[in-house]
Every structure is written in structure tokens, then in C-alpha cells.
Image (spheres, grey):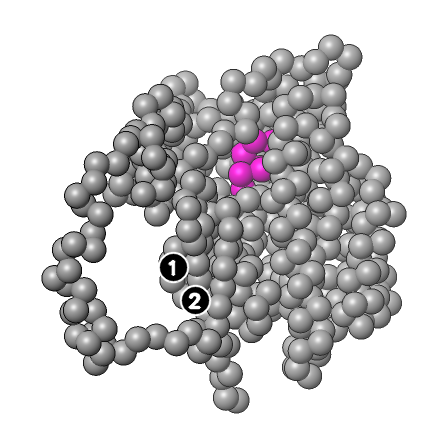
């Protein structure tokens, strides 16, 4: 009997006071609903999450390591793009 | 656990302090666990019979304890890593319920607790779990049999969780505030167990020829003790349980099996074998510190 592998899903969890969903890992599931359940069971069992996103791994388009230099190296020396020359008041959130 | 949060609330300098839960190195491990019974008054409310309350908690607690132990036997044996963890989570939820319920039973009726040698550090709920013999356990036989295959496990879990959810929903209004709080916590947990069991039940029924064959065999295995679960449960919830079970059977497209309920002995032999394994280490070391 041949073993049929379930498709791979990537899992994103938003923490209790986290602002964004954060990639936490991947898992296998037969369909989208099962992937949410599996993510709940595998990745939120220590009280990590209040919201889960799952997406099939084959639906993600990723940059290639070969493109690393043309994509990212040009930003490496543009220090003037960083807002480090401003002082930010303590009560300005989410910066 | 909560002192991190309080520190943060007192001097929140940055929103990220909250994101990190006060300890940047450990935020991924989760935060803010709640102790559902912290600081609760465990005296028995006026008008309630302490022995009856203890008996009720013991029956609910033993159901959870025995079934938790069975489900935990899937650890490292489930069909997939994800199911392995899902079943272990369910087992741990039930173990937590058992711990609270046995502790509640002991507080309401201290005479139930087995006596251990002077100086034993074993807490009361552990004394009830590890130092009673099988004939003193109050659980239904439904939770005792060995797991069988995944289809048998799912079928038993679906029926157990459906029944327990109905019972716990009822007990949220119990006059004992401690039991009511335990039930309220349990409702959220067992609602997920029922959801998990129901989804897999339908999946197996509508899946492959092999999964359906196994599910139909599982019905024949599990249903003979189902009537005992309904008949001897702690509250009469038969009607509402049957509505849910019939719905799931209909969605799954399977008939209720034509099996005779099993009557007879109080416990099955499977329970004594399980307890022998579960209790042997604790009993060998009544003064042990874990």
C-alpha cells in the first residue's frame, strides 16, 4: 500500500498581545479546516495564540537565495532610509 | 505567572514589553495561564449534602482520569504526529479535570481519601488516583476498554465527549461554586474534543473503503457500552446527547448499529490491568517526592 502524504501547510499565529501573525512552523493536514485544528493542537498548546492563519505551502511564492544580492544588498548601505535621526516620544505606539 | 504582566502594566514603556510577556527569551512559550480555582472557598455550601457532592465529583473525576489514561496510550503511536499531539492534548485536558474534581471530592468528604503512612507528601487527589483499588473507582465502563484502532478511538471519543459536554453544561449552574467553575472550564475543553471526534468520525465514514469499513466495525465495538454511559451518567442528558449523535451519524451517512447493551459487572477486567500499570510506581513509594 502506498502512503499518501497530506499536503504541507505553513502556520501563522498571532499572540495574545502580538500585533501581527507570526510564522511559527509547518504541518501536514488533509484540508484547510483540518490544518487549522492541527495548528491549534500543535502550535497553541502553551497559550501562545488568539488567532491562527494557515496556508498551503505550495501557494507561497518565495524569493530565491540566488536573488539575495540583487534583492537585498542595495538596501544595505542606505542608512538615510532608517528613521534613526528622529527621537520618538515614549507614548507613540507601534513604532 | 502573573507578576510579569503586572510589572508590565505598571510601567508600560513600550508596546513590545507586552508582546514579549516581560521575558524576551521566552515569549514563544506562552504566557498568562489562569488557575481556575485559585483562592476559591472549598467549604460545602449550606443545603448541599457533602457526601453526595463528593460522590458526584468522584464519578466525573474518575471518568476523566481513566479515559485520560487510555487516550494517553496513543502517545507516540498515533497515525500522524499531528494526531498524536491532538490526542495527547485531549488526554491532558481530561487529566486536568480529573485533578480538580478529585481534589473537590476530597475537600468535600475527606473520609474518601486513602490513608497513607505518616509524613507522606502525596496530595489528596493523587491518593485517590493511585491508592484506590479498581472496585472503588466510580467511572463508567464505557471508558475502560483498550483503544483499539483509530476508528474505535474516534467513535468512543465522539460519544464520550458529546455526553460529557451535555453533563458539564448542566453542571455550570450547580449550587457548589467550585464544581460549577470546574464545569465551566471543562465545557470549553470538551467542546473541542467533540468537534475533533465529530470531524474525524465523518472523515472516516466518507473517506476510503478501508476507513469506512473500520468505522462501521468500530460502531459495533463501541456501542454496546454506550447505553450504560447514558443510563448511569451523573445527569439525565440522554435526549440532548442522542440528538447530537443522530446528527453526526446522519452527516456521516452511517446507521446506528443494532447491538445489545452490555449489562453485568461494575467494572471490566481492562480497568484492573490499566490501574495496575498506572499505580504501581506510586504505590511502591508512598513517601516518594516527585
Q: Are marks 1 and 2 in contact (CB under 8 Å)?
A: yes
Q: Quadrant of residue B112?
A: top right
- Across and down, in percent, residue B98 comes to 58, 37
Q: Residue at x 32, y 43 (%)?
A: A95
Residue at the limit of the structure toward the bottom, as seen here: A1
Between A65 and B97, which is closer to the camera in this rendering? A65
| Residue B154, numbered label | none
**Chain to which the residue tagged by mark 2 belongs:** A
Query: Does the rendering let one see residue B242?
Result: yes
- Mark 2 burial class by Cα count in 10 Å: few <14, some 14-19, many 20+: many
Q: Nearer the viewer, residue B272 or B247?
A: B247
Q: Which residues are magenta?
A: B95-101
Give the residue at x 53% y 38%: B96
Instruction: Please say whether residue B74 is one of the residues in the magenta stretch.
Output: no
- Magenta segment main secondary structure: helix
Task: In the rendered view, tell whether residue B81 sits above or below residue A16.
Answer: below
Q: Chain of mark 1?
A: A
Residue A50: x %, y % from top left: 50, 46
Can residue B97 be found in the magenta stretch? yes
**Label 2 element class:** strand
- The residues tagged by marks 1 and 2 sit, at their Cα atoms, a distance apart of 7 Å
Which badge, 1 or 2, is on the more N-terminal residue? 2
Q: Nearer the viewer, residue B31 or B161?
A: B31
Q: Is residue B79 visible?
A: no
Residue under label 1, please give it: A23
Q: Residue at x 56, y 50 (%)?
A: B90
Q: Which residue is mark 2?
A: A10
Q: Position of residue B171 (x, y in %)?
A: 73, 32
Element carrying mark 1: strand
Q: Quadrant of the C terminus of chain B?
A: top left
Amino acid at each position: 500500500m502506498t502512503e499518501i502524504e497530506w499536503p504541507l501547510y505553513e502556520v501563522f499565529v498571532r499572540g495574545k498581545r502580538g500585533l501581527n501573525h507570526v510564522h511559527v512552523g509547518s504541518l501536514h493536514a488533509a484540508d484547510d479546516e483540518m490544518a487549522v485544528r492541527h495548528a491549534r493542537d500543535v502550535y497553541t498548546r502553551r497559550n501562545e495564540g488568539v488567532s491562527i492563519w494557515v496556508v498551503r505551502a505550495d501557494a507561497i511564492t518565495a524569493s530565491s537565495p540566488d536573488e539575495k544580492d540583487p534583492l537585498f544588498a542595495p538596501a544595505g548601505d542606505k542608512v538615510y532610509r532608517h528613521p534613526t535621526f528622529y527621537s520618538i516620544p515614549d507614548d507613540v505606539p507601534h513604532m | 505567572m502573573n507578576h510579569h504582566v503586572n510589572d508590565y502594566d505598571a510601567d508600560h514603556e513600550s508596546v513590545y514589553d507586552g508582546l514579549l510577556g516581560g521575558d524576551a527569551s521566552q515569549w514563544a512559550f506562552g504566557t498568562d495561564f489562569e488557575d481556575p480555582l485559585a483562592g476559591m472557598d472549598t467549604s460545602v455550601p449550606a443545603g448541599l449534602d457533602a457526601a453526595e457532592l463528593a460522590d458526584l465529583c468522584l464519578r466525573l473525576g474518575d471518568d476523566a482520569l481513566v479515559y485520560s489514561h487510555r487516550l494517553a496510550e496513543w502517545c507516540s503511536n498515533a497515525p500522524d504526529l499531528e494526531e498524536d499531539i491532538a490526542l495527547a492534548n485531549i488526554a491532558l485536558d481530561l487529566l486536568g479535570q480529573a485533578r480538580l474534581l478529585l481534589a473537590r471530592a476530597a475537600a468535600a468528604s475527606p473520609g474518601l481519601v486513602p490513608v497513607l503512612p505518616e509524613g507522606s507528601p502525596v496530595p489528596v487527589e493523587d491518593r485517590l488516583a493511585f491508592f484506590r483499588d479498581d472496585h472503588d473507582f466510580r467511572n463508567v465502563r464505557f471508558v475502560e476498554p483498550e483503544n483499539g484502532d483509530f476508528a474505535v478511538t474516534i467513535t468512543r471519543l465522539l460519544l464520550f465527549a458529546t455526553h460529557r459536554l451535555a453533563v458539564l453544561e448542566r453542571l455550570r449552574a450547580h449550587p457548589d461554586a467550585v464544581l460549577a467553575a470546574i464545569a465551566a472550564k471543562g465545557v470549553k475543553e470538551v467542546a473541542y474534543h467533540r468537534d475533533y471526534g465529530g470531524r474525524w468520525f465523518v472523515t472516516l465514514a466518507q473517506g476510503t473503503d478501508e476507513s469506512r469499513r473500520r468505522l462501521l466495525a468500530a460502531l459495533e465495538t463501541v456501542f454496546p457500552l454506550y447505553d450504560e454511559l447514558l443510563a448511569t451518567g451523573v445527569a439525565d442528558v440522554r435526549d440532548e446527547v442522542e440528538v447530537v449523535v443522530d446528527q453526526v451519524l446522519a452527516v456521516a451517512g452511517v446507521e446506528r448499529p443494532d447491538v445489545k447493551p452490555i449489562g453485568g459487572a461494575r467494572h471490566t477486567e481492562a480497568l484492573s490491568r490499566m490501574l495496575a500499570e498506572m499505580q504501581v510506581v506510586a504505590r511502591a513509594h508512598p513517601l516518594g517526592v516527585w
